[in-house]
Image (cartoon, rainbow, N blue to C red):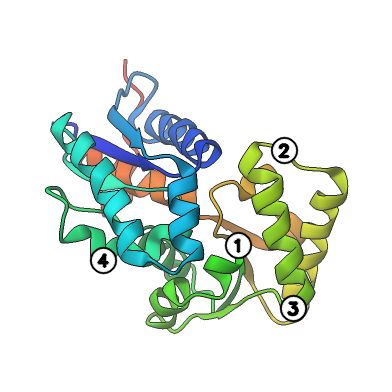
Amino acid sequence: MIKHIGIVGVSPEGAALFIRELSRQSHRIGGPNAQLRVSMHNEPLAGYLNAIRLGDWHGVAALLSKSAEVVAAAGAEVCVTPDHAVQYALHLAEHETPIPWRSMPEAVADAIAREGRSTVGLIGTRWVTAASTYQTHLGLRGIQVLSPDGDEAEDLDRIIVDELLKGEVRTSSREKVRQIIRNLEARGCEGIVLASSEAPLAVEPGSNGLSVYDAGSILAEAVVRDALSLAGRGEVAPPAA
């Protein structure tokens, strides 16, 4: 029985990219005829941004819970959000949600640990790179997490908020992100975590020769495997006849 997946959208661009990745992963894992059952709901992005800027994580959790209740009423059996900044409030939302959540940082930590990496860099907004969510999940696996420093963190935040959230990316911004990744590599990073759901708009796979861990893609694969009852078996279903 294919599980019904509930998506809690935060930014429109991030949610759209995640739905597309879910479709790609379902075809890759389950074959060309694999069809997922998906429901999505979002509250306006401005509400999330205002709450995050105020440090009102209970307010963020309330918005997440409201959307989770909608997708649960539509039949969803598990809930995910591809947004990174709100992951900090997930444990608060869980208490008010009738269905379980799947944690993106936990899925990312599993993927990186399987490959034996010891140090990775974070590409995300200041709300993510300066927070403890990824540092905690990866640190518990013995993985060190490095974030951009000073002006680079500000530049990255501006690029994501002012451009990527709107589905835009300037050539100069793309090159700036490449330079930030090169600097993280020089500090000892063996891989880069795309800890922004819009980051794939600016970062190509294999950037600078480093392993790129697209958190949205990793989460999509995890929930698809679970939905198709292949979770944890590391196998790909044969193509449908």
Whole-percent x, y for residue 229 in the image = 20, 41
Q: What residue type is labelled 1?
A: Thr
Q: What residue type is labelled 2?
A: Glu
- 3D distance between C-alphas at marks 1 and 4: 20 Å
Residue placed under numbered mark 1 in the picture: 125
**Residue at the (66%, 44%) spot, across then down:** 164
Residue 150, label in figure? 3
**Residue at the (28%, 41%) spot, across then down:** 67
- 3D distance between C-alphas at marks 3 and 2: 24 Å
- 3D distance between C-alphas at marks 3 and 1: 13 Å
Q: What residue type is labelled 3?
A: Gly
State the SS at label 2.
loop
Residue placed under numbered mark 4 in the picture: 91
Mark earlier in primary sequence (4, 3): 4
Mark earlier in primary sequence (2, 4): 4
Whole-percent x, y for residue 199 in the image = 63, 50
- 3D distance between C-alphas at marks 4 and 3: 29 Å
Q: What residue type is labelled 4?
A: His
Q: In which quarter of the image is residue 44?
A: top left
